Image (tube, rainbow, N blue to C red):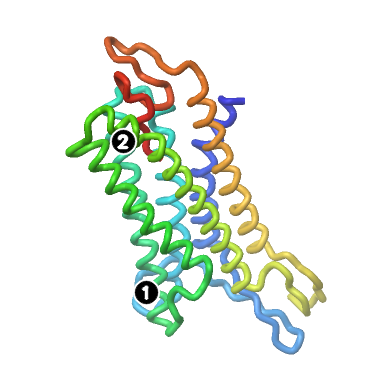
Amino acid sequence: MELVARVLAHSLPVLVVILVGYWMGSGLTAYAVTDGIVTAKDTSGFSWSHGDARVFNWHPLLMSFGFVFCSMQAALAYISLPFSHAVNKRIHLSLHALGFLSAVLGAVAVFRFHNEHSITNLYSLHSWLGLGVLILFSAHWLGSFIVFFYPGAEKNVRASIAPYHIGIGLSIIGLVVATIEAGILEKLAFNGSCNVNGELNGKTVKGYMASDCVLGNVIGLLVALSLVALVVTIWHAKHQEPAKQVGDEATPLLLGSSGDEKTEISV
C-alpha cells in the first residue's frame, strides 16, 4: 500500500502537468449557443504577445507545475531521495523556490490577460483562494528558510517548530488543491463545454459533455488523488520505524534529520 501511494504521489503530479499542458496547448475549446446553434471555438495554444488571449493559458500550466509538481516533489524529498540530509534539504528548498517562481509567473499571466482585456481582477472564489495561497506559501517558505536553513535556529527550537511547519505546509498544499478545483470549475463554466444543448455539427445534442469538459474533470480528479497519495505516503513514513543509521547520524525516514531534531521536513 505504501509503495503504491509513494509511486502515485510522484507520478500523478507529472501526469497532471502533462494533461494541463495538452488541455491548454491543444484541447481547449469554448462553446457558445446562438438561436439554438452551437459553435465551437478553439482557444488553445500559448502566447506572450500583448493582447493575445492565449496568454491566459500559461496560468494553469505554470500553477500546476509550481504548486502541484514542485511542491509535492519537495514534500517527498526527505522520504524518497537517497541523499544525505543536507543534500535533501537543499533539493527540498530549491523545489519549493522553483515552484513559487513558476506560480508567480502564472499569476502574472492571468493578471496580464485580465488587464489587457478589461476584465476585473480578483472577482472569484478561485482568485481569492489563489492570492491567499501565494501569500501563505511565500510567508511559510521565508520563515522556514530562516529557521531551518539560514541563519538557522537552535536545534531544540527547530525540533519544536517542525511539527507546525509540517502541518502548515500540508495545509497549504490542501488549499492549493482546493484552489485548482475551483479554477477548473470556473474555466469549464466559461467554456460552456459540460452541458451543451442545441445543434452541434448538424446534430441535436442535449446535455452533451465535450472532450474539453471530460479532460478538465479528469485533471481535477487526478489532482485530488495526488493529494491523497501524498498524505498517505507522509503518514506512513511518519509512523514507521523512526530512524535509520547513516554513519554516525540517526536519520528519521520521513524527516532526514539528525540528533534530536526529529521532525525537520518542509512540505
Badge 2: residue crowd in 10 Å (few <14, some 14–19, many ≥20) = some
Q: Is residue 226 left or right of residue 62?
A: right
Q: Residue at x 60, y 43 (%)?
A: 225
x%, y% of residue 51?
Answer: 38, 80
* Quarter of the picture holding the N terminus: top right
x%, y% of residue 219?
Answer: 59, 53
Q: Is residue 221 above or below residue 156?
A: below
Residue type pointed to by label 2: Ile
Task: Choose between 16 and 132: the one closer to the eye.
Answer: 132
x%, y% of residue 25?
Answer: 49, 61
> Which residue corresponds to mark 1?
112
Q: Residue at x 61, y 67 (%)?
A: 188
Q: Note whether residue 80 is visible.
A: no
Mark number for residue 17?
Answer: none
x%, y% of residue 7?
Answer: 54, 31
* Quarter of the picture holding the C terminus: top left
SS state under label 1: helix
Extreme bottom residue here? Answer: 35
Task: Choose between 4 and 198: the one closer to the eye.
Answer: 4
Mark number for residue 91?
Answer: 2
Q: Is residue 117 above or below residue 211?
A: below
Q: Is residue 167 left or right of residue 213?
A: left
Residue type pointed to by label 1: Arg
Q: Is residue 265 left or right of residue 153?
A: right
Number of numbered discs on residues: 2
Q: Which quadrant of the view contains residue 265?
A: top left
SS state under label 2: helix
**Which one is earlier in the sequence, the residue at label 2 or at label 1?**
2
Q: Residue at x 53, y 30 (%)?
A: 235
